[in-house]
């Protein structure tokens, strides 16, 4: 039986390096329980929406895939802020979550941008995710 790396390591690699494949597989894994016939976007989306409602998060986002690629997922600014506020209050996994964001100028997808564009060196001063589609 294969033993996966810790979830924190997987999420770290997914967020730091914009690994959409990891995001897709993590979503499908939510519903991939033994004897279920494997995970699927549909089953995992239903589980994610039940979790969203259980936690009392605002509205009803639309989650059709894990990576957010394409135009089928929908989440409002209010919903995103609600989710981030919820995560901020989860002291058990908040350190892992914050560590998974790229450290500007040091690693992740921001590293080459800062170096290649001649931007001011802010190495280590910020952690963030870019959501820019080019």
Image (cartoon, helix red, strand yellow):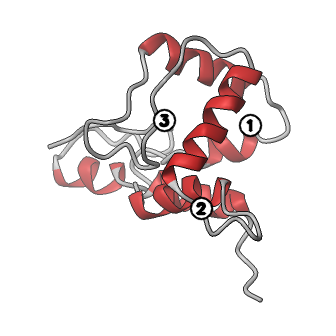
- For label 3, the SS is loop
Residue ID at (42%, 56%): 108
Q: Position of residue 32 (x, y in %)?
A: 67, 63
Query: What's the mark number on residue 126?
Result: 3
Left/right placement of residue 54 relative to residue 30 reads right
Question: Residue 55 falls in which quadrant of the image?
Answer: top right
What is the CA distance from the residue labelled 2 to the residue labelled 1?
Answer: 26 Å
* Front residue of 3 and 59: 59
Mark 1, other Cα within 10 Å: few <14 / some 14–19 / many ≥20: some
Q: Are marks 2 and 1 in contact (CB under 8 Å)?
A: no
Mark 1 or mark 3, which has the lower sequence index?
Answer: 1
Q: Position of residue 50 (x, y in %)?
A: 69, 30
Is any part of residue 107 visible from this angle? no
Q: Are marks 1 and 3 in contact (CB under 8 Å)?
A: no
Residue ID at (38%, 26%): 74
Query: What's the mark number on residue 39?
Result: 2
Up the image or down, 35 lies above or below 124; here it is below
Q: Position of residue 67 (x, y in %)?
A: 41, 49
What is the CA distance from the residue labelled 1 to the residue labelled 3?
Answer: 16 Å
Which mark is nearer the camera, 1 or 3?
1
Query: What's the mark number on residue 94?
Result: 1
Mark 2 or mark 1, which has the lower sequence index?
Answer: 2
């Amino acid at each position: 039986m294969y033993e996966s790396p810790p979830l924190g390591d997987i999420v770290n690699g997914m967020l730091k390096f914009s690994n959409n494949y990891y995001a897709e597989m993590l979503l499908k894994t939510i519903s991939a329980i033994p004897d279920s016939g494997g995970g699927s976007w549909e089953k995992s989306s239903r589980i994610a929406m039940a979790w969203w409602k259980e936690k009392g998060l605002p509205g009803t986002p639309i989650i059709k895939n894990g990576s957010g690629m394409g135009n089928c997922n929908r989440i409002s600014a209010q919903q995103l802020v609600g989710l981030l506020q919820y995560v901020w209050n989860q002291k058990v996994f908040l350190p892992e979550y914050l560590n998974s964001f790229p450290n500007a100028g040091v690693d992740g997808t921001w590293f080459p941008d800062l170096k290649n564009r001649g931007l001011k060196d802010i190495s280590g001063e910020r952690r963030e995710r870019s959501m820019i589609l080019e």
